[in-house]
Image (spheres, grey):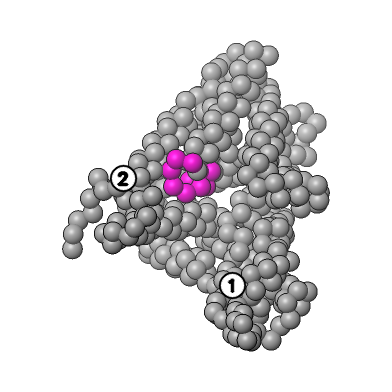
Amino acid sequence: MAAINPKSSGLSELWSRLRFVLLALIIYRIGTHIPVPGIDPVKISSLFDQNQGTLLGLFNMFSGGALERMSIMALNVVPYITAAIVMNLLEATTPSLKKMFRQEGEQGRRKRTHYVRLGTLLLAIFQSMGFAIALSSQGMAIDPGTMFIFTAVVSFVTGTMFLVWLGEQVNERGIGNGISLIIFASIVSGLPSAIGQSFEGARQGEISLILLLTVAFMAIIAISFIVWVERAQRRVTVNYARRNPNQMAMGQASHVPLKVNMSGVIPAIFASSIVLFPASISSWFGQSEGMEWLQEVSLALSPGQPLYVVVFSILIAYFCFFYTAIQFPAKDISDNLKRSGGFLPGIRPGGHTEEYIDNVMSRLTVWGSIYMIMICLLPQFLIVSANVPFYLGGTSLLIAVVVVMDFMAQVQSHLLSSQYQSLMKKANLKGFKR
């Protein structure tokens, strides 16, 4: 088998894109170690030592350890995700926005991106001010005061906007979704140290080796189950009629692939962001005098608590249906089939086709939402009930696996494209180079 030559014209672009993704992730990881000026690292370290296994630790994992180090990227891309959620809600409920974003083509897409950036900036300023005021009031700053708050806000906002820009550069010059890859890098960055601590605990007898192997086996099963469900499809048969001068004849048959989980990891990310935001605010400001009730809110929204389970499950189910409805509307699918001359066997085009597709997608989304709730919550029950040191929770595990699958799919697409170009050149077809 011939070796792949990275210098070939077909693969040179792929290698350059992979190098850019790697460089972007390295820059991001370096940025998570740059602290905000004026932070007392000893007090910050003590705070996180006292809150291990709580919501603060979960938020720290999603930030790639940047929150624990109180780096300039402590907010990570959470403001961007929240702004995207708000924009999706506004687009679904405001017909004028929907028309502007979807019917104006590339210009509409640029307007939507501009509004999401503006929303990210406003949310980043708001969250940064909350962080900075909380750090100053709780004595986490070396010299608390107005100057520290201003410096911290500028640092946090700059870090978040830089990550948004870096993610967009990965979209244009790299492979995969830049924001998803940043979240993926944040999640897996602490995995090596967590595995090392688990084996060290097993060596010292603090953790049962059998229990540790059981967790590893369950993680493999969970990953296999995620891959199996994410690749599952419900194929709706579509026939295309072709016309000839004499009669209408049956044409080419195809299918519309409808995934079990049409919404991907978006519901898990959206639900986590919504739950983490009020809970993190409660944990920061709950220590102030007269605000002790916020601590109770933070504890009630901690992973494993009944309120957290109920709210998180409802949010996941809601966003599964909501995101599927706005991204894959049955009416648009029905209209596209009608314009292209396609029809479902035994179903009349138009409203009947729309109703059938909507029913199929609704049933699939029910199972997809149940699947996402199981994956996101079952590992947390394992952690709470058996006290298992399972680093990756269900949400982070789902995000990591799906991002890797999407990344590999795009790499394979580039490889197939390069092979197609080489075959066309070898065939010496006229006009190919033109």
Q: Is 123 on the left-hand or right-hand side of 262? A: right
Q: Residue at x 56, y 75 (%)?
A: 255
Q: Residue 256 — which label?
A: 1
* Picture quadrant where residue 108 is located: top right
Q: Position of residue 427 (x, y in %)?
A: 28, 62
Name the element at disc 1: strand
Q: Position of residue 123 (x, y in %)?
A: 69, 34
Magenta segment: 172-182
Q: Is 192 on the left-hand or right-hand side of 294? A: left
Name the element at disc 2: helix
Q: Earlier in the sequence, mark 1 or mark 2?
A: 2
Nearer to us in this view, 261 or 315: 261
Please say whether residue 12 is visible from this viewpoint.
yes
Determine whether 359 is above or below 162 in the image: below
Nearer to us in this view, 424 or 117: 424
Q: Residue 12 — which label?
A: 2
Residue type marked 2: Ser
Q: Position of residue 432 (x, y in %)?
A: 36, 55
Q: Is residue 181 magenta?
A: yes
Q: Around disc 1, counting alpha carbons within 10 Å, would you say few (fewer than 14), some (14 to 19), or many (20 or more)?
A: some
Magenta stretch secondary structure, dominant: helix
Q: Is 313 on the left-hand or right-hand side of 396? A: right
